[in-house]
Every structure is written in structure tokens, then in C-alpha cells.
Image (tube, rainbow, N blue to C red):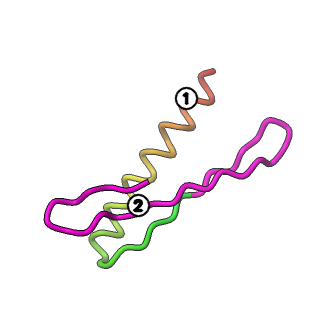
């Protein structure tokens, strides 16, 4: 996945899904950030993505 940032290079985010068996999956998100501010923003956004995925799978 990537995110276009106006005036900057696209930021690449990697999502890894690992089948743990027994209908369980581990989701891991990683992203290289150049500044602490970028890191903090990426961490907040990634947590929102994971929370949304968790809400979806627990609702179904």
C-alpha cells in the first residue's frame, strides 16, 4: 500500500497477514518514517486501520 503526500515522495506501508490456523489471522503493519512526526502520524493511522479491521471481524 502507499500513501501520496503532496510535495513529497509516496510513503509505502506493508501489510503482512499470517494464517495462525483455527480461523485466526495475525495482521502486521510496517512503515519506514523519516521524522518523529511522520512516525507518530503513521502509528495513529495504522492503529485506526487495525481497530476498524478488528471491529469488522468481530461483528461478523
The residue shown at (30%, 69%) is: 38
Which one is in front, 3 or 40?
Answer: 3
Q: Which residue is mark 1?
A: 56
Q: What's the residue at 53%, 37% (across, down)? A: 53
Magenta segment:
1-28
Badge 1 crowding class, 10 Å Cα cut-off, few under 14, some 14 to 19, many 20 or more, is: few
The alpha-carbon separation of the residues under discs 2 and 1 comes to: 20 Å
**CB under 8 Å between discs 2 and 1:** no
> What x and y, as percent, mark residue 29?
53, 58
Give the side of residue 3 with respect to residue 16, left or right.
left
| Sequence-first disc among 2 and 1 | 2
The correct choice, above or below, for 60 with respect to 3 in the image is: above
Image quadrant in which the C terminus is located:
top right
* Total count of labels: 2
Q: Position of residue 22 (x, y in %)?
A: 85, 38
Secondary structure of the residue carrying numbered label 1: helix
Residue 49 placement, left or right of 6: right
- Determine the residue positioned at 55% across, 29% down: 56
Q: Quadrant of residue 24?
A: top right
Q: Is residue 49 left or right of residue 59?
A: left
* Residue 49 drawn above or below residue 56: below
Residue positioned most to the top: 60
Image x and y of residue 43, in percent: 41, 61
- Helix, strand or loop at disc 2? helix
Q: Is residue 32 magenta?
A: no
Reading the image, the residue beneath label 2 is 43
Residue 2 shown left or right of residue 56 in the figure: left
The dot on residue 25 is none
Amino acid at each position: 500500500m502507499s500513501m501520496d503526500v503532496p510535495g513529497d515522495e509516496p510513503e509505502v506501508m506493508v501489510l503482512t497477514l499470517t494464517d495462525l490456523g483455527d480461523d485466526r489471522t495475525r495482521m502486521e503493519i510496517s512503515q519506514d518514517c523519516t521524522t518523529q512526526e511522520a512516525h507518530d502520524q503513521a502509528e495513529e493511522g495504522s492503529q485506526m486501520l487495525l481497530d476498524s479491521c478488528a471491529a469488522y471481524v468481530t461483528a461478523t
